[in-house]
Image (cartoon, rainbow, N blue to C red):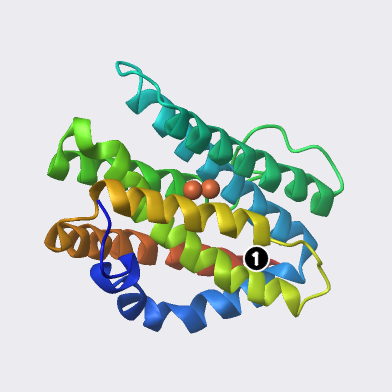
């Protein structure tokens, strides 16, 4: 289904998240110039991308896997690899998997994903969860990575998120086309995700403060 309005307008996501933009920007500005913590943050993004690709795989187990879904799954798996590669580059060492030592806010990040997945599945049913979970997460990914890209361009780290962002943008359009028709549900789920994101952001900020105190 093609829509006459954008997923941003239909979800109200950008307006609802304008209040968090200065906070995430200042968090990112801190983190990119601090290699050990930047590595932990990159490894957290790698874990979230991995959870995303895993979710797609599990949700399609009893279905016929389409070319489009396989492409989506493989791109999310590649994003997990991309962030892992950069996490290890910045850390200057191998980071095995995702544990409390090598992943920033590992448990809160995993809980963010798990709670979001559970809440959306409850609301729209397991059969529709793939499209809706993806749509809501793509909004967050596009929002976050655009700010992150902007911060990186002004930093000493020259890593580029441009091709990754282009893929997330395409996923967002595709997911909106398959299930964004009900703007009431979209607004509701996006507002719920924003609450969960705020909790994760608080953990990320705490992590910074705690580490600064400890340093
Ligand atoms: Fe992704
Ligand atoms: Fe994506």
| Res 212 visible | no
State the image coordinates of residue 7 (x, y, percent, origin top left). Answer: 32, 65
Residue occupying the point 36% across, 75% down: 14
Instruction: Tell me the residue that label 1 is attached to.
Output: 211
The quarter of the displayed image where residue 202 is located = bottom left
Reply above or below: 28 against 197: below
Task: Name the side, left or right, on which 130 lies relative to 161.
Answer: left
Q: Quadrant of the C terminus?
A: bottom right
Task: Name the side, left or right, on which 203 lies relative to 38.
Answer: left
| Res 64 visible | yes
**Viewer-proximal residue among 98 and 4:** 4
Q: How many labels does the image show?
A: 1
State the image coordinates of residue 200 (x, y, percent, origin top left). Answer: 42, 60
**Label 1, residues with CA under 10 Å away: few <14, some 14-19, many ≥20:** few
Reply above or below: 157 against 171: below
State the image coordinates of residue 197 (x, y, percent, origin top left). Answer: 38, 62
Reply above or below: 192 against 208: above
**Viewer-proximal residue among 9 and 160:** 9
State the image coordinates of residue 187 (x, y, percent, origin top left). Answer: 20, 65
Task: Name the side, left or right, on which 121 lies relative to 73.
Answer: left
The residue at the far right in this view is 92
Dot 1: what SS? helix
The quarter of the displayed image where residue 138 is located = bottom left
Residue occupying the point 59% across, 80% down: 26
């Amino acid at each position: 289904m093609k829509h006459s309005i954008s997923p941003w307008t239909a979800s109200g996501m950008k307006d609802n998240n304008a209040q968090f933009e200065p906070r995430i920007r200042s968090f990112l500005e801190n983190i990119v110039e601090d290699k050990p913590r930047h590595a932990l943050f990159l490894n957290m993004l790698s874990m979230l991308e991995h959870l995303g690709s895993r979710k797609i795989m599990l949700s399609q187990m009893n279905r016929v896997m389409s070319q489009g879904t396989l492409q989506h799954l493989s791109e999310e798996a590649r994003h997990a690899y991309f962030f892992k590669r950069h996490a290890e580059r910045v850390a200057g060492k191998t980071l095995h998997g995702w544990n409390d030592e090598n992943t920033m806010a590992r448990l809160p990040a995993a809980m963010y994903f798990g709670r979001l997945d559970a809440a959306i599945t409850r609301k729209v049913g397991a059969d529709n969860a793939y499209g809706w979970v993806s749509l809501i997460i793509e909004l967050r990914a596009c929002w976050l990575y655009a700010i992150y890209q902007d911060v990186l361009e002004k930093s000493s780290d020259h890593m580029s998120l441009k091709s990754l962002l282009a893929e997330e943008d395409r996923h967002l359009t595709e997911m909106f086309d398959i299930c964004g028709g009900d703007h009431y549900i979209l607004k509701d789920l996006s507002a719920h995700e924003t609450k969960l994101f705020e909790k994760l952001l608080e953990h990320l900020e705490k992590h910074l403060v705690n580490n600064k105190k400890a340093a």
